[in-house]
Image (cartoon, grey):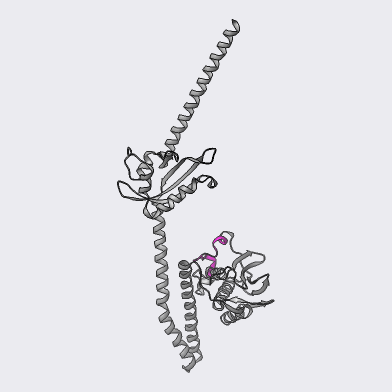
């Protein structure tokens, strides 16, 4: 009898403990759910739940608001599809179906446009979710969130429009400047050949010609910038050639205008390959000009050309102040100038496009442009160019 009473007491105690655990668990879950609701409301996040077996769809008030519905509106999957912008509908359906395949891992992440069912307002949304599967691998449920990202999308669109306007403006300006520049160049050439000029007058005319050439290079840089912005790469036209000859031609022209800085060329091995001669000359000119602008007074600029495997390397080295480490990640971006570029600006070459265009030319040939710089060894720009242009755009 005492044993029965003892068992009854133990059973009652265990039952009471189980009830207490259940109540505590339910309270904790309700508290977690309440905190989740507060967090999603504060962050403007909508929560949705889709039963892929029954087709039942549940939205919270924020989801309804983003879809242009009243809080008490009924929702179903067909209503959801009808609210998606027609141009995005197929893409969203494909993403939903893909997430319901077990091999996808159930991940669902997409950005698309909604058109308000009642208010007809177009909104961009970012939707994240996950599909859950039963033991047989069948999808049974999708749960996720939705965030209105319309403000961000509008800001991105405005920025792209500003960039497009800038590119159109630069292209128009560059073409417009070529006509008077051509007239100046022709006139100065005629004066040099037939003007019977005094030495002082000849020097003035040569100054005009030098300024015209500098302006022509600047216009070419602007045109290349707009081409790379619109087409993604500077166009090139390959033909068989010798890098040694191409580099020497570009360097000889620079020597004529920079007699104060020795420019040494060191060709090694074979320079044969498929190159765009004009673009190679432009790239070498930009790299050597940059080296001359930043060379230590009294030091020389060295240009080495050497083979490496199926590539040819062009190394342009100068002694001078090291490039600041914080500048290296953006050194080949457009418009890169710094206070250290005072001499370059004084010479009229401070637009900040030379290295950008050299980098684009190397990439267009299927190669790359890299830089190494420190105070002890100086700065070396290395252009790697595949001889046969593997992977390059033509």
- What residue sits 42% from the left and 44% below the top? 146
Q: Is residue 226 left or right of residue 292?
A: left
In the image, which residues are magenta?
327-342
- From this view, report whether residue 45 is shown above or below residue 159: above
Viewer-proximal residue among 90 and 58: 90
Q: Is residue 349 left or right of residue 383?
A: left
Viewer-proximal residue among 250 and 86: 86
Instruction: Using the rendered view, name the quadrant where residue 2 is placed.
Output: top right
Query: Residue 80: image x %, image y %?
Result: 37, 45
- From this view, report whether residue 30 is shown above or below residue 273: above
Q: Quadrant of the N terminus?
A: top right
Viewer-proximal residue among 262 and 248: 248
Give yes or no for residue 335 being in the magenta stretch. yes
Residue furthest to the front in view is 136
- From this view, report whether residue 388 is shown above or below residue 49: below
- What residue sits 41% from the left and 76% below the top? 175
Residue furthest to the top in view is 1
- What residue sits 45% from the left and 34% below the top? 35
Give yes or no for residue 230 being in the magenta stretch. no
């Amino acid at each position: 009898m005492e044993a029965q009473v003892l068992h009854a007491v133990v059973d009652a105690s265990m039952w009471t403990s189980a009830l207490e655990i259940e109540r505590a668990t339910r309270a904790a879950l309700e508290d977690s759910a309440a905190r989740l609701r507060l967090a999603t409301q504060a962050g403007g996040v909508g929560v949705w739940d889709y039963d892929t077996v029954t087709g039942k769809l549940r939205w919270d008030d924020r989801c309804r608001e983003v879809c242009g519905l009243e809080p008490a509106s009924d929702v179903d999957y067909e209503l959801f599809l009808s609210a998606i912008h027609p141009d995005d509908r197929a893409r969203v359906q494909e993403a939903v179906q893909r997430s319901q395949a077990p091999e996808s891992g159930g991940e669902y992440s997409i950005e698309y446009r909604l058109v308000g069912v009642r208010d007809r307002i177009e909104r961009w949304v970012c939707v994240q979710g996950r599909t859950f599967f039963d033991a047989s691998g069948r999808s049974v449920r999708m749960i996720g969130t939705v965030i209105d990202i319309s403000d961000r999308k509008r800001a991105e669109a405005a920025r792209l429009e500003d960039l497009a306007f800038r590119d159109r403006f630069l292209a128009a300006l560059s073409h417009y400047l070529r006509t008077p520049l051509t007239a100046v160049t022709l006139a100065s050439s005629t004066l040099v050949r037939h003007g019977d000029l005094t030495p002082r007058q000849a020097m003035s005319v040569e100054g005009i010609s030098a300024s015209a050439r500098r302006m022509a290079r600047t216009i070419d840089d602007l045109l290349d910038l707009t081409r790379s912005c619109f087409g993604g790469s500077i166009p090139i036209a390959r033909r068989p050639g010798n890098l040694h000859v191409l580099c020497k031609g570009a360097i000889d022209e620079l020597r004529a205008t920079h007699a104060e800085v020795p420019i040494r060329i060191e060709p090694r091995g074979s320079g044969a390959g498929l190159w765009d001669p004009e673009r190679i000359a432009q790239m070498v000119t930009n790299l050597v000009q940059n080296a001359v602008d930043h060379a230590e007074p009294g030091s020389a600029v060295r240009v080495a050309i050497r083979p490496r495997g199926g590539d040819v390397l062009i190394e342009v080295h100068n002694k001078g102040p090291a490039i600041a480490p914080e500048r290296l990640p953006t050194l080949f971006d457009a418009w890169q100038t710094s206070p250290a570029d005072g001499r370059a600006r004084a010479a009229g070459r401070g637009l900040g496009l030379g290295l950008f265009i050299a980098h684009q030319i190397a990439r267009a040939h299927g190669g790359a442009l890299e830089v190494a710089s420190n105070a002890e060894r100086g700065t070396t720009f290395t252009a790697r160019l595949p001889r046969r242009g593997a992977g390059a755009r033509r």
